[in-house]
Amino acid sequence: MRISNHVQMVFDQMNIQPDDFKNLLFDLGTRKEIYDAETDRIISKAEADEKVLTFVHNVLGIDKNSTKKQIRRAKKAHLKELYEVLEDVIDFKTDTGFHESEFFNELVEMRNLSRGDSQEFWSDNDVILSISKVSGDHHDFILQTLGEGESYTVNTSVYGAAVGTDIDLYLMGRRDWATLTDKIAEAFVIQIQNEIYAEVMNAGEKLPVKSQFNKTMAIEKANKDTFDTLIEDVSMANGNAEVYIMGTRTALKKLTAFADIDWISEDQKKEVASMGRLGSYEGTTLIEIPQRFANNDVTKKLVDSKKLLIMAKTEDKFVKFVDVGDTEILETTEKGARMDDTMKYEVQREMGIYTQISRYFGVWNIA
């Protein structure tokens, strides 16, 4: 844990070891059973929250009865030092948050450079890289062709996710530690996942796919043979590899329109009842890409729900994600920078995304 002399002095005064406190924060933040090393026992969430809040108050030099003016002055003096503790917890929660998505676990190869992972990737087959270069809210996409057995590295850049929260509520004991760190970590995870999902769904727009692999048709009985042929063609073009069908829940649910053709089994009917969609289509695995609203705009969805992608299933996962693994929190607190008492956090993390796609894949635009 990276701490200042002032924070270390608070640890000493409270007779707390920094590593023990970090473990307490992780257990509390991830809602696990909480062990307190100081008392050598399992403690309740309420006890853990009280201990953390006491530590935070001691770092800032305030208490529960402090006025807004006292809290504001304390934040200016010592809040940055508190971020040094927050950042380590957010690093952990961000890293674990990536893996809560079925799509991420199945299709994304992640390297974390802070853990010593290699930056070098290999291309096992002839592929086209669709490179998403991220800088703030500006994205540049580059296409690069690689042959079999070539290596490459993923360039990284700083990625920022802004999240606002009223830290005064926490300092006054009205919001718990897990909620405070969740708001920061979750906003950052969502931003990165959105970038990956959007990049994958835009593959058909960026790559020169032949017309036999790009269809615009309704999902209905008359077109089932065409859909099945597209799956077969993608498989054969990639050495008879298995394939995935990917899309949003809304897009995948449309496959049930084929249900009047006697191919859907009783088990698959149960899948629809429990999952809201099929889990597979005639043996072909379905992967759901989570739908998202654009930031602060519930009228705009980020992932096209009228598109299905048919991708070859290979041992080499086709999305390459490099995470430098070092979160930094910046703040806006100066008078006039905000119109209210809420804090603005800019969570920054360095990362890079490449999408390594086979030359042959299918796109089904749902008419």
Image (tube, grey):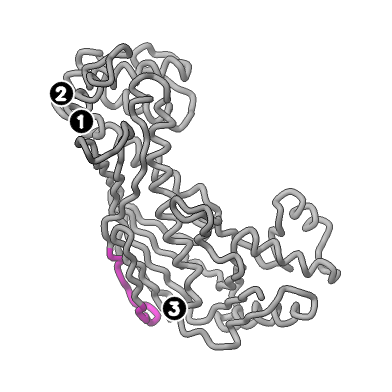
**Occupied quadrant, residue 304:** bottom right
Query: What residue is pinned by disc 1?
Result: 81
**12 and 149: which is toward the camera:** 12
- Between label 2 and label 3, give the one nearer the viewer: 3
Q: Amino acid at mark 3?
A: Lys
Above or below, comparing residue 77 to residue 155 in the picture: above
Helix, strand or loop for disc 1: helix
Q: Nearer the viewer, residue 37 or 163?
A: 163
Q: Residues within 10 Å of mark 1 (few under 14, many from 20)?
A: some
Residue 81 lies, in percent from the top left, at 20, 30
Residue 251's quadrant in the figure? bottom right
How far apart marks 1 and 2 lie (CA) works out to 8 Å
Residue bounds of the magenta highlight: 143-155
Q: Residue at 44% across / 52% down in the picture?
A: 295
Return the x and y of residue 45 as percentages of the image width and height.
47, 20
Q: Quadrant of the C terminus?
A: bottom right
Question: In the rendered structure, does residue 243 fall within the stretch colored magenta?
Answer: no
Residue depicted at 53% across the width and 59% down the height = 301
Q: Which residue is denoted by mark 3 in the rendering?
A: 206
> How many angstroms separate mark 3 from mark 1 (CA)?
45 Å
Amino acid on which the number 1 mark rests in the picture: Glu
Which comes before the other along the chain, label 3 or label 1?
1
Q: Is residue 42 visible?
A: no
- Name the residue tied to disc 2: 6
Is residue 21 placed above or below 114 in the rendered structure?
A: above
Question: Camera-side residue: 57 or 340?
Answer: 340
